[in-house]
Amino acid sequence: MMNLEEESPKFTRSSIDKRQRVIESARKGDFSLAKKFSTDSDPRVRSTSISVLSENLALDDDLIAIALLDPHPMVRSSLARAAATNISIPVLHLLDDVDASVVEVACWAVGEQGETHDLAIEILSRIALDHDDALCRESAVASLGALGDLRGLKSILQATRDIATVRRRAVIALAPFEGEAVTDALETALSDRDWQVRQAAEDLSQFFKE
């Protein structure tokens, strides 16, 4: 069982060896080591175990529940990444994670899953507008664009007034939408002070003309 007091993100020969053994065993169809090491003291080992089990459709509900509460964001990020293709993982729970790196990946995963129900759109919209971390806002905007749900359009439009990296992502996220508000946002972006925002707006404007 993992000892939280001894948990360390530092690389060790033992952890490298364990991760290699997990991967090699999985290639032979044996997931017993991955399950055993899913509660290892090293978060890197636990993270690898979660990834391997998910990739091989061997991540059961009990292991998901444990990983959701894992004290290290590296493990929760692996679980969030796995949620992109594993709908049994409650990815919306990870959108409220205390660690920004987990939230960023979870936003991406929601877009990949295609979660378009009210709560998913609501949480993504909140992150897109209010999260302290710009990468999280950017990821949430991208996810809203990938979902293409009209309920997320207002947040995407507001995000076109964020910092440059988020504005650029917001312009790209407008692709599935149309209407006067979208046209106005693109017109504004065409004269943005950031050249990459302008380029994204030009590319999207050309797409709409085709």
Image (cartoon, helix red, strand yellow):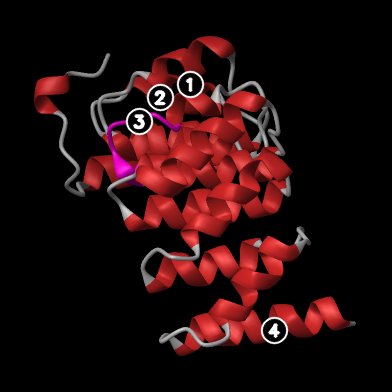
Kindly identify which residue carries mark 2. 38
In the rendered structure, which amino acid carries the disc numbered 2?
Ser
Q: Residue at x 55, y 63 (%)?
A: 170
Question: CB of mark 3 within 8 Å of CB of mark 1?
Answer: no
Q: Can you tell which mark lies on residue 35?
A: 1
Q: Can you tell which mark lies on residue 203?
A: 4
Kindly identify which residue carries mark 3. 97
Q: Residue at x 32, y 23 (%)?
A: 70
In this rendering, would 11 be left or right of 5? right
Q: Which residue is more in the foreground, 16 or 183?
A: 183
In the rendered structure, which amino acid carries the disc numbered 4?
Asp
Q: Which residue is more in the foreground, 138 or 112?
A: 138
Question: CB of mark 1 within 8 Å of CB of mark 4?
Answer: no
Q: Nearer the viewer, mark 3 or mark 1?
A: 3
Q: Nearer the viewer, mark 4 or mark 2?
A: 4
Q: Marks 4 and 3, how far apart in space?
A: 35 Å
Q: Which residue is more in the foreground, 95 or 53?
A: 95
**Extreme-left residue of the structure:** 5
In the rendered structure, which amino acid carries the disc numbered 3?
Asp
> Which secondary structure dominates the residues rendered in magenta?
loop
21 w.r.t. 168: above or below = above
In the rendered structure, which amino acid carries the disc numbered 1?
Lys
Q: Residue at x 64, y 26 (%)?
A: 118
Is 116 magenta? The answer is no
Span shown in magenta: 95-101
When asked about the image quadrant of residue 152, the answer is: top right
Q: Nearer the viewer, mark 1 or mark 4?
A: 4
Q: Marks 4 and 2, how far apart in space?
A: 45 Å
